[in-house]
Image (tube, rainbow, N blue to C red):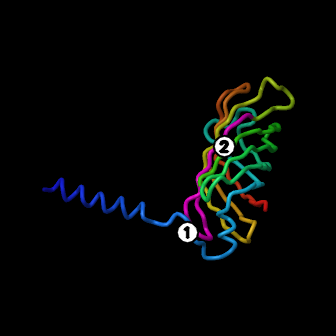
Amino acid sequence: MRFKIAAILLIFTAAGLYGQPNNRIARTPKLNYDWQPGFVSITEATGALGLGLTYDELSKYYYGITTIAGYQFSRNIKAGIGAGIHLHNEGTLFPLYLDARYSLSAQDLVPFIAAAGGIAIDPKVIDDTRVFINPSIGVRYVVAKKTAVTFSTGLMVTTGGPNNRKSFLNFKLGLELKGK
């Protein structure tokens, strides 16, 4: 008897979830535009503090700027290719990476999770090129029809170079622009 009641409740719950409309309407035109697929450009100022052993080369801190050219596939999914410059305490690295973002369904203030990964090129010694990953969480605020401001924080982990693994707590403040 309990199994039958639980099965009936499960069926009604699933039917209610699948019965929701797919094409929801945003509260304002700027949000309705934000949900549309299309080209997106994200430029971010970034800064980070080293974690763990910070006495090695390029491990105390960094700051820089990155830009991502990507595409918004749906209301929630964006992906792109990024490049930038990171000025470390004792040198400079040029990151080239892939970036993917998943936005939760919201209106003006939109939480998101992001994952980036690629290589950071050392122009002085190409053999010291590093591989990195950078998962992060953040929030987007849609300020106008084609514009949003982003803030995120995450953990940057690099490996390679002369002293192997380094990790950073990083912060990013960005401007997201959409095409037509």
- Cα separation, mark 2 vs mark 1, equals 30 Å
> Magenta part of the protein: which range?
103-119
Residue at left 82%, top 43%? 85
Q: Nearer the viewer, mark 2 or mark 1?
A: 1
Q: Pointer 1: what residue?
A: 24
Q: Please state, as top left, top right, bottom left or bottom right, where the N terminus lies in the image.
A: bottom left
Is the stretch drawn in magenta largely helix, strand or loop? strand
Return the x and y of residue 110 as percentages of the image width and height. 60, 64
Name the kind of residue labelled 1 in the image: Arg
Q: Is residue 76 left or right of residue 59?
A: left
Vertical relation: 140 (above or below) 72: below
The residue most toward the right is: 124
Q: Pointer 2: what residue?
A: 116
Q: Nearer the viewer, residue 79 or 154?
A: 79
Q: Nearer the viewer, residue 39 or 68?
A: 39
Q: Nearer the viewer, residue 57 or 121?
A: 121
